[in-house]
Image (cartoon, grey):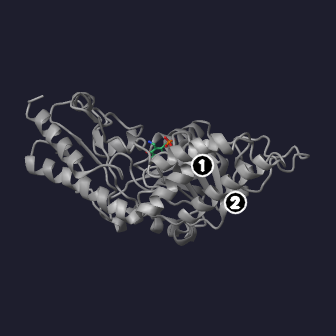
């Protein structure tokens, strides 16, 4: 099987990731930060090192700004539900995943907030910025938007959006689900208050891992409270990060696997990976374009406006049917709505979805060429 569903979760993982997880089960088997015995201290130290690595990777002030969570969805819920004010207004984009839209919609239906979806203009960041500026209101209490659309690869100018938010004294939360480990981003340089990331996509960590990076954790109300191993005499959830957001026993094998995944991206070089994967996605795009047999929605998926992934359709064929045929040819891709109906509404593909392919660090030119061959064969009716 040739796996091109890396936008859902990356596969395979680097061997260092499974090695780190096995080491964790063998050597770091005690609850970190809960006891004074040697194995607990050793485990806490190993977890701390991953925290430090993640903080450096995302330009957070320090390891205490990093909380380990289950996935990007959990991090986004923690920020959205923790940051909004009763009667407040939220600015978001028209390309958001349900991990953003469903929490917002729940809050809207409970009459806690209203929200505005900003129309993004791909390839024209000035126009996109004008739209964000117009959406800002007196009562705006949060801006939450994706860094990269998981459906179309469109990259939002989050640096400029963050600057705008700061001018309005509105905190910004960036959903880095489709960009963490794929496009460089720095909280410090870009003025980002909250950064949410999955561990299991471009950071090559295991499934069930994610990161919430927050500049000022105490400003967020908590969704989950419980034991942190600190200030246990108090019945009140601590304000300090990361304890504020890490109640209960941690996923130590997952966290150490995530650390090995981030180290892998650092060693390969995020810029090298981005350029290599963009070349692969653009190669497929060019073949499709030349053939005239494939419905393409976006311009060529190249830097700086696009991340390396490609969504498309074949004429008169449902996306699920195309994906099922590709599966029979040995290719794993994802069809349908990718949990992002608003992003599909943007290009008018809500009715049939789209087929999405996404390369990873482990994808080679021969594989993407074979993929393009298979798609064009199916398009030509030979399958
Ligand atoms: N936001 C976007 C843009 C995504 O693509 C995804 C994952 N498909 C998520 C949020 C949720 O990430 P996770 O699966 O780690 O919860």
Comparing 373 with 136, the one in front is: 373
Residue 188 image offset from top left, x and y in percent: 57, 70
Q: Residues within 10 Å of mark 1 (few under 14, many from 20)?
A: many
Classify 10 Å Cα crowding around label 2: few (below 14), some (14-19), many (20 and above). Answer: some
Residue 44 lies, in percent from the top left, at: 72, 51
Residue at screen point 78% across, 40% down = 226
- Mark 2, ligand 1, within 8 Å: the answer is no
What separation in Å lies between label 2 and label 1 (alpha carbons)?
17 Å
On screen, residue 75 versus residue 300, left or right, reads right
- Image quadrant holding the C terminus, namely top left
- Residue, disc 1: 256
Please report the residue visible at 18 percent of the width from the left and 30 percent of the height from the top. 317
Q: Residue at x 83, y 50 (%)?
A: 230
Report whether residue 94 is seen. yes
Where disc 1 sits, the SS reads helix
Assign the N terminus to one quadrant of the image: top left
Residue at left offset 45%, top offset 43%: 97
* Residue 190 at x, y percent in the picture: 52, 69
Count up the numbered dots: 2
Percent x, y of residue 10: 41, 44
| Residue 175 in the figure: left or right of residue 40 | left
Q: Is residue 122 visible?
A: no
Which residue is disc 2 drawn over? 64
The residue carrying mark 1 has its beta carbon less than 8 Å from ligand 1: no
State the residue lying farthest toward the right: 233
In the figure, is residue 74 to the left or right of 382?
right
**Closer to the camera, 161 or 6?**
6
Instruction: Judge by depth and name the residue closer to the eye, 141 or 199.
Output: 199
Q: Foreground mark, 2 or 1?
A: 1
Residue 51 quadrant = bottom right
Element type where label 2 sits in the image: helix
The dot on residue 365 is: none
């Amino acid at each position: 099987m040739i796996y091109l569903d890396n936008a859902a979760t990356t596969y395979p993982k680097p061997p260092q990731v499974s090695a780190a997880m096995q080491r964790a089960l063998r050597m770091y088997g005690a609850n970190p930060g809960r006891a004074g015995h040697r194995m607990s201290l050793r485990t806490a130290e190993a977890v701390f090192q991953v925290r430090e690595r993640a903080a450096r990777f995302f330009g957070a002030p320090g390891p205490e700004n990093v909380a380990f969570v289950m996935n990007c969805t959990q991090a986004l819920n923690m920020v959205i539900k923790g940051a909004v004010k009763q009667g407040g207004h939220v600015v978001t984009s028209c390309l958001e995943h349900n991990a953003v839209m469903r929490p917002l919609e729940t809050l809207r239906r409970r009459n806690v907030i209203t929200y505005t979806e900003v129309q993004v203009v791909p390839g024209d960041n000035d126009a996109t910025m004008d739209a964000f500026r117009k959406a800002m209101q007196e009562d705006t209490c949060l801006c939450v938007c994706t860094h990269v659309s998981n459906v179309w690869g469109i990259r939002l100018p989050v640096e400029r959006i963050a600057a705008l938010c700061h001018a309005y004294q509105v905190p910004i939360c960036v959903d880095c689900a489709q960009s963490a480990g794929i496009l460089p981003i720095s909280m410090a340089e870009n003025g980002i208050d909250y950064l949410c990331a999955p561990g299991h996509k471009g950071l090559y960590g295991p499934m069930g891992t994610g990161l919430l990076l927050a500049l000022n954790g105490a400003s967020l109300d908590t969704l989950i409270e419980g034991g942190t191993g600190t200030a246990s005499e108090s019945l009140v959830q601590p304000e300090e990060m990361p304890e504020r957001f890490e109640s209960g026993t941690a996923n130590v094998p997952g966290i150490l696997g995530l650390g090995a995944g981030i180290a892998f991206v650092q060693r390969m070089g995020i810029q090298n990976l981005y350029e290599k994967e963009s070349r692969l996605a653009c190669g497929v795009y060019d073949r499709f374009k030349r053939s005239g047999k494939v419905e393409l929605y976006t311009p060529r998926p190249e830097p700086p406006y696009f991340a390396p992934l490609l969504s498309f359709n074949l004429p008169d064929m449902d996306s699920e049917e195309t994906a099922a045929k590709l599966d029979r040819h040995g290719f794993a891709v994802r069809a349908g709505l990718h949990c992002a109906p608003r992003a599909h509404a943007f290009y008018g593909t809500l009715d049939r979805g789209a087929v999405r392919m996404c390369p990873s660090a482990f994808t080679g030119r021969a594989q993407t060429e074979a993929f393009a061959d298979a798609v064009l064969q199916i398009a030509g009716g030979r399958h």
